[in-house]
């Protein structure tokens, strides 16, 4: 290593970036984390509108990073709103048919957990300093230089960071990706996802519910206080109209759209909407710059897999580094980095196109698609080995 050079500089301090920095530091690598704004502390009194259906393999990753007990509020950690879900129910409004996943059928206590973005970020950041991660915050990347031996980032506060590798985890509009000259392919869905919290007349039954509607899927995700987090994907104009509704009108629209599965629905939080887009970087590695998370891939939220895919990028990089160090090999050779990038891009591309295909099939107005959707869902539900395979793929196990 050059004088003054660290092993890795991670750009972006969200869930994926903070997990990356922590994972590398726990392997005794020197790490700098660059983030434009420090996250606000998680508060039990202010639920975050951004929630995830967190998969078991990523809970195991957080456990390895020493963060899962704090997320789960156990072993002396303060209580949190983490909610396990034991079932998933998926059905189509037009074609009928229903697919049910049940933890009991797979010999598990839960299929996964519903967790707030802010909680994950808070618990990861709480461990960065103790792991030896050097924070540059607030700071943003303005320039990149790289050669065969490493990279140098110029920050907007005038400082520079020299590292063997730079890792872009700074979101779908990644500045570091653009500076590295990595192009992306993608398309806008013409949809927005409306998010918020609601209360329902009937209990959510620790079940994640999803109904496919002609304009896009509607998900009800169970929360620890008995409420549900909703994600309603709709054409952009319809989403804006939903945001403009008063609470009574919105609640009635939700109740109808959800087929009153949980009785009457009443909103209990502000609402927001975010545009939906599929995007894939053409490469995950350019010289000594690596892409992870949304900087590498953005997928439709219908399967709740966005953050799970990003954390699988982290786990795969962690495993690659650990394998090299166990063999007393250099973890940052161009060949090893390229191999990690090809493997992750292949898996993420398959997932992104699978989610895209599902969204297309279930929003298609064609009669053939409508007639096929319900029977296919019903078939998957009646074949235990098929439904188990679908769940294992989503769970990463």
Image: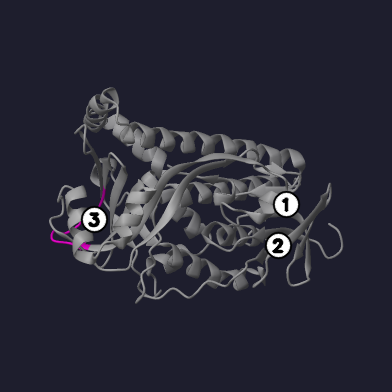
- Of residue 394 and residue 323, the one placed in the foreground of this image is 394
Q: Is residue 277 magenta?
A: no
Q: Is residue 280 above or below residue 75?
A: above
Q: Is residue 366 above or below residue 217?
A: above
Label 3 – label 2 distance at C-alpha: 42 Å
Q: Which residues are magenta?
A: 199-209
Residue of label 1: 179
Residue of label 2: 141
Q: Residues within 10 Å of mark 2 (few under 14, many from 20)?
A: many
Secondary structure beneath dot 1 equals: helix
Residue of label 3: 206
Q: Residues within 10 Å of mark 1 (few under 14, many from 20)?
A: some
Secondary structure beneath dot 2 equals: strand
Label 1 – label 3 distance at C-alpha: 44 Å
Q: Is residue 230 above or below residue 91?
A: below
Q: Is residue 378 left or right of residue 9?
A: left
């Amino acid at each position: 290593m050059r004088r003054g050079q660290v092993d890795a500089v991670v750009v972006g301090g969200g869930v994926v970036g903070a997990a990356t920095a922590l994972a590398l530091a726990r392997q005794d690598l020197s790490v700098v984390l660059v983030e434009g704004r420090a996250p606000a502390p998680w508060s039990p009194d202010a639920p975050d509108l951004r929630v995830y259906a967190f998969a078991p393999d990523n809970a195991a990753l957080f456990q390895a990073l020493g963060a899962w007990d704090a997320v789960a509020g156990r072993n002396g950690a303060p209580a949190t709103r983490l909610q396990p879900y034991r079932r998933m129910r998926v059905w189509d409004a037009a074609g009928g048919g229903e697919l049910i996943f049940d933890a009991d059928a797979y010999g598990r206590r839960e299929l996964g957990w519903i967790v707030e973005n802010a909680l994950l970020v808070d618990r990861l950041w709480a461990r960065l300093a103790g792991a030896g991660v050097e924070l540059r915050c607030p700071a943003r990347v303005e320039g990149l230089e790289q050669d065969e031996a490493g990279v140098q980032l110029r920050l907007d506060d005038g400082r520079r960071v020299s590292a063997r590798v730079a890792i872009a985890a700074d979101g779908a509009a990644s500045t570091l990706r653009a500076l590295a000259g990595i192009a992306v392919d993608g398309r806008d869905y013409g949809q927005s996802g409306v998010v918020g919290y609601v209360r329902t007349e009937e209990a959510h039954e620790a079940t994640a519910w999803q109904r496919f509607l002609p304009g896009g899927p509607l998900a009800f995700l169970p929360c620890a206080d008995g409420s549900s987090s909703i994600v309603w994907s709709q054409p952009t104009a319809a989403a804006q109209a939903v945001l403009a509704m008063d609470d009574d009108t919105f609640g009635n629209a939700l109740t109808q759209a959800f087929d009153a599965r949980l009785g009457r629905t009443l909103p209990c939080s502000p609402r927001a909407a975010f545009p939906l887009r599929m995007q894939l970087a053409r490469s995950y590695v350019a010289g000594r710059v690596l892409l992870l998370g949304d900087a590498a891939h953005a997928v439709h939220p219908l399967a709740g897999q966005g953050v799970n895919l990003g954390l699988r990028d982290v786990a795969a990089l962690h495993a690659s580094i650990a394998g090299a160090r166990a063999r007393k090999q250099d973890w940052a050779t161009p060949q090893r980095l390229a191999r990690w990038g090809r493997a992750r891009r292949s898996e993420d591309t398959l997932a992104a196109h699978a989610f895209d295909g599902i969204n297309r099939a279930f929003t298609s107005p064609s009669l053939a698609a409508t007639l096929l959707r319900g029977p296919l869902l019903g078939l998957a539900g009646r074949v235990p080995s098929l439904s188990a395979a679908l769940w294992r793929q989503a769970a990463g196990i």
